[in-house]
């Protein structure tokens, strides 16, 4: 297990994959296998956010394959887990991978291509640029509504503001000085990038949504919080 800054770090990795995880014992092993099978040179940093199940125990079984585990003593929120992982990341680029099976690491090459070719500073993997299944009309249209607000406020042309797959240079994400501890991570990143005038390029990705019964944690109220965060970083907070 890796839970201190003295751990050996992957300084030659093209990509740092930060995996925030909370009570994901049903899926964490499967997503780690998928991440390890994807050939991009990378480091995988799992931040167990105070899970009460076997999530951390399962992650530890991947230690001899280079997966690093960092543990929070208590549940602090998705954003807080990402902050912890970002402090330990050493790859050239960074991306967030949810600890379930909704997003497919096979899309990493498509997401990374505009970055590696110098065509973009930031790439979002959009679930809405191709036909994908919708487990819930509420979640789908809620995400669309948040994206509409982001475009209205910042003059952008995004199709999927709330996507998990946000990729950029590690130093750029670290320079944002992110504050959100929960699901506000996504709108905070978007708001701060757009206030800076950073162009966000989107590429289509696969998406396999899961239901609340299957463990989906984001709620409808998180959409309202996302809109408030977008408003805050547009009108009140300096970039």
Image (tube, helix red, strand yellow):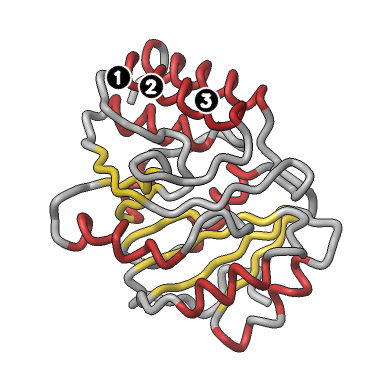
Q: Nearer the viewer, residue 149 or 63?
A: 149
Residue 230 in the image: state x and y as whole percent: 44, 20
Secondary structure of the residue carrying numbered label 1: helix
Q: Which residue is mark 1?
A: 154
User: What label does residue 141 carry, if any?
Assistant: 3
How crowded is the residue under tag 1: few (<14 C-alpha within 10 Å), some, or many (20+)?
some
Residue 82 point in image, percent of width and height: 55, 50
Query: Callout 3: helix, strand or loop?
Result: helix
Image position of 44 (left or right of 56): left
User: Tag 3: Cα neighbours inside 10 Å, few (<14), some, or many (≥20)?
Assistant: few
Quadrant position of residue 175 = top left
Q: Image height check: is 207 above or below 150? A: below
Foreground disc of the pair 3, 2: 3
Residue 80 lies in quadrant:
top right
| First reached walking from the N terminus: tag 3 or tag 1 | 3
- Mark 2 lies on residue: 150
Residue drawn where x is 52% and y is 16% of the image: 228
Residue drawn 50% across the image and 62% down it: 88
Q: Is residue 88 above or below residue 80?
A: below
**Pointer 2 and pointer 1: residues touching (CB < 8 Å)?**
yes
| Residue positioned 62% across, 58% down in the render | 99
Query: From what the image shows, is residue 37 above or below residue 140?
Result: below
Single out the residue that lies furthest toward the right.
Answer: 52
Separation (CA) of disc 3 from disc 1: 20 Å
Residue 105, quarter of the rendered image: bottom left
Left or right: 185, with 221 as reference point: left
């Amino acid at each position: 297990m890796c839970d201190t800054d003295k751990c050996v770090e992957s300084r030659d990795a093209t990509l740092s994959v930060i995996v925030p995880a909370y009570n994901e014992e049903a899926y964490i092993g499967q997503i780690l296998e998928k991440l390890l099978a994807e050939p991009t040179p990378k480091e995988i940093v799992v931040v167990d956010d105070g899970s009460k199940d076997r999530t951390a125990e399962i992650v530890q079984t991947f230690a001899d394959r280079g997966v690093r585990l960092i543990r929070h003593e208590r549940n602090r929120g998705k954003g807080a887990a990402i902050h912890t992982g970002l402090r330990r990341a050493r790859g050239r680029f960074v991306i967030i991978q949810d600890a379930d099976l909704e997003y497919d690491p096979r899309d990493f090459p498509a997401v990374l291509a505009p970055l590696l070719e110098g065509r973009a500073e930031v790439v979002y993997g959009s679930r809405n640029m191709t036909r994908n299944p919708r487990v819930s009309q509420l979640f789908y249209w809620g995400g669309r509504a948040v994206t509409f607000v982001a475009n209205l406020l910042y003059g952008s042309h995004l199709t999927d503001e709330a996507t998990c797959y946000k990729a950029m240079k590690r130093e750029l994400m670290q320079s944002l000085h992110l504050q959100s501890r929960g699901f506000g991570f996504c709108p905070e990143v978007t708001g701060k990038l757009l206030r800076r005038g950073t162009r966000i390029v989107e590429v289509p990705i696969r998406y396999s949504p899961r239901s609340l019964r299957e463990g989906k944690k984001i709620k409808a109220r998180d959409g309202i919080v996302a809109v408030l965060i977008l408003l805050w970083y547009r009108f009140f907070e300096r970039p």
